[in-house]
Amino acid sequence: MIDLYTFTSPNGRKVSIALEELGLPYTARFVDITKGEQFKPGFLALNPNNKVPAIVDHEGPGGQPFTVFESGAILLYLAEKTGKLLPADVRGRTEAVQWLMFQMSGVGPMLGQLTHFQRYAKEKLPYAIERYTKESERLLGVLDKHLGPHEYLAREYSLADIAMYPWLVIGQQFFPELFTSVANVREYMNRVGARPAVQRGMKVPEPR
């Protein structure tokens, strides 16, 4: 059994999608970051960086409980634990990991910063909004060009797609204008979003 500490955020939903795809038994434990629950000692013992998600695998290496934080690290751990969602050969594995890193270092942070400065910042800063809008557009353009001849980010459906999809969903929800000219990205979102495990994972955690 795995305990998943999560919130209704793209990074949290990466892990619930992966768990659903892998068919691993888990319990979702809601951490309400709007109420500061990520700063409570119990959660800080799991993730000293006070961010969701985090997991506790009660059947970790050697049969002992094992805690993992950072969404990318969790996806890699689950893939290696099960031998799924990550190609075994060096070329295939590296292709999947490089697109995972593209999401982790590019698409997620840029859309996240754009969301902050456009929607939540008390002061509207035109420079910041323009900067993150342009960089988000550029990254979506890179993604769109890659997806033209490719069904998925790597040679097969992988943890890279699981990481990317929730961020694209929230990006399209908040900034639909960024997605009007990236038809390949929209088709890709439809393809990934049609997977039953993705649909189940996107609903975790259910509102309480």
Image (cartoon, rainbow, N blue to C red):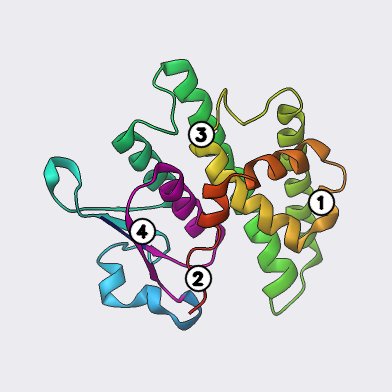
Q: Which residue is mark 1?
A: 178
Dot placed on the residue nearer the N-terminal end, 1 or 4: 4
- Are the two marked residues, 1 and 2, in contact with CB atoms closer than 8 angstroms? no
Residue drawn where x is 72% and y is 71% of the image: 119
Q: Of the residues tagged 4 and 2, which is closer to the observer? A: 2
Residue type, label 4: Ala
Q: How much space separates mark 1 and mark 2, taking CA atoms? A: 28 Å
Residue type, label 3: Ser
Q: Which mark is residue 158?
A: 3
Q: How much space separates mark 1 and mark 3, taking CA atoms? A: 25 Å
Q: How much space separates mark 4 and mark 2, taking CA atoms? A: 17 Å
What is the x, y in percent for residue 82?
A: 32, 36
Q: Which residue is mark 2?
A: 206
Residue at the bottom extreme? Answer: 35
Residue range corresponding to the magenta coloring: 5-32
Q: Which residue is mark 4?
A: 54
Dot placed on the residue nearer the N-terminal end, 1 or 2: 1
Question: Is there any visible trace of residue 104 in the rendered image?
Answer: no
Q: Of the residues tagged 3 and 2, which is closer to the observer? A: 2
Secondary structure state at the residue bearing disc 4? strand
Q: Is residue 1 magenta?
A: no
Label 3: few (<14), some or many (≥20) within 10 Å? many
**Depicted 30 relative to depicted 174: above or below:** below
Residue 123 lies in quadrant? bottom right
**Depicted 197 relative to depicted 121: above or below:** above
What is the x, y in percent for residue 73?
A: 38, 44
Residue drawn where x is 82% and y is 51% of the image: 178
Residue type, label 2: Glu
Residue type, label 1: Leu
